[in-house]
Amino acid sequence: MILLTGATGTIGGALARRLAADGIPFRALVRRGSVAIPGAEVIVGDLDDPATLPEAFADVDQFFLNTAGPYPDERPVITQQLAAIDAAVAAGAEHIVKVSAVGARTGGPMPFGTHAKIEAYLADSGLAGTVLRPNTVMQNLVRAITRFTPEGDLFEAFGGKIAYVDARDVADCAYAVLTGSAPRGGAHDLTGPGALTAAELAAALSAGLDREIGLVQPAVDELEPILADQGMPESYIKHFVELTRLVTAGALADVTTAVTDLTGNSPRSIEAFIAEHRDQLRGSPARSFWA
Ligand SMILES: NC(=O)c1ccc[n+]([C@@H]2O[C@H](COP(=O)([O-])OP(=O)(O)OC[C@H]3O[C@@H](n4cnc5c(N)ncnc54)[C@H](OP(=O)(O)O)[C@@H]3O)[C@@H](O)[C@H]2O)c1
């Protein structure tokens, strides 16, 4: 049996839809019993409450591990994912596919350092693991993670190129590994077919949405008070500033062939994503900042 966490989320939801479409049996651990996951055996449980996990993990051979990102605090995410790994070990599972992040490295800012800690725990767990490290997902554009000013311009502190990947391609990689068409193991940096600066992203949005979208890009040294004004929690600001320095220096710029290597298909492009989500992107140009 394959168990999914995060099946109500962006990446896990796409994976659940693929498994269901192909009639592959799977189980989904969800926090709310009212949630429907087509094709899944749904079990209510909460990674914050380890006592609820054994039922979900019974008879599980493979496990897809994903939860929310570590904003504004990494501790809940680490506790949840370590509890899930422990439950998988206790249940005798063979293999985990863990969603991490491009740039994961010990001592790095959130989320890089967060995922590195979980990857290290997984490596020591005795379970076979496949680590998928997505670059920034394109879906951030339509779910209020990418920021726009009240005028509808792109607010992007990161100065370097970013090799955006479609969350559906991340899910397709997980699908390939879980269903055996791609080999288990390794850590894979997942990207789209190209990398863009924020100015290039603003130009792609302008072209795709038929309106001029400007770019607001503060210098890294000016960032702290701007983020504080926007309501970003104090505890997160130092991580975000460090992240900005790393991304501006190119931490997310490398384009890889991992999606094609694992799935056999070319990754989706940002232009195709913008065209497909044109109505959503045109309908909500102004979003609030971090609050
Ligand atoms: N966004 C990016 O650009 C990006 C890039 C690289 C890596 N990542 C990584 O990708 C992950 C986020 O993936 P996503 O965007 O697909 O997530 P998401 O859409 O935010 O979904 C999070 C999922 O985790 C579930 N969850 C949260 N807390 C839980 C708990 N205590 N018990 C059980 N389930 C719980 C949520 O369930 P509910 O429906 O109950 O809330 C939901 O299904 C993070 O680790 C992030 O660091 C993100």
Image (cartoon, grey):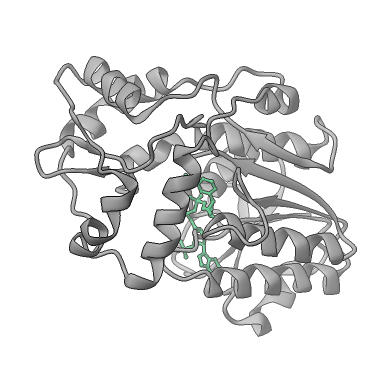
Q: Residue most toward the left?
A: 151
Q: Residue at x 76, y 73 (%)?
A: 87
* Residue 113 rendering spot, x and y as whole percentages: 60, 60
Question: Seen in the image, is 147 located left or right of residue 177?
Answer: left
Image: 39 above or below 176: below
Image location (x, y in percent) of residue 162? 47, 32
Q: Looking at the picture, tell me which residue is in the foreground, 224 or 87.
A: 224
Res 24 → quadrant: top right
Q: Check the picture and name the quadrant holding the C terminus.
A: bottom left
Q: Is residue 23 visible?
A: no
- Residue under the image location 79 percent in, 54 percent down: 1
Residue toward you, 240 or 183? 240
The relative height of residue 256 versus residue 243 in the rendered view (above or below) is: above
In the rendered view, does 62 fall on the left or right side of 290? right
- Whether residue 280 is visible, yes or no, is yes
Would you identify the image quadrant in which residue 173 lies?
top right
Left or right: 122 as drawn, with respect to 50? right
Residue 282 location, x and y as percent?
18, 30
Extreme-front residue of the structure: 221
Q: How many marks?
A: 0
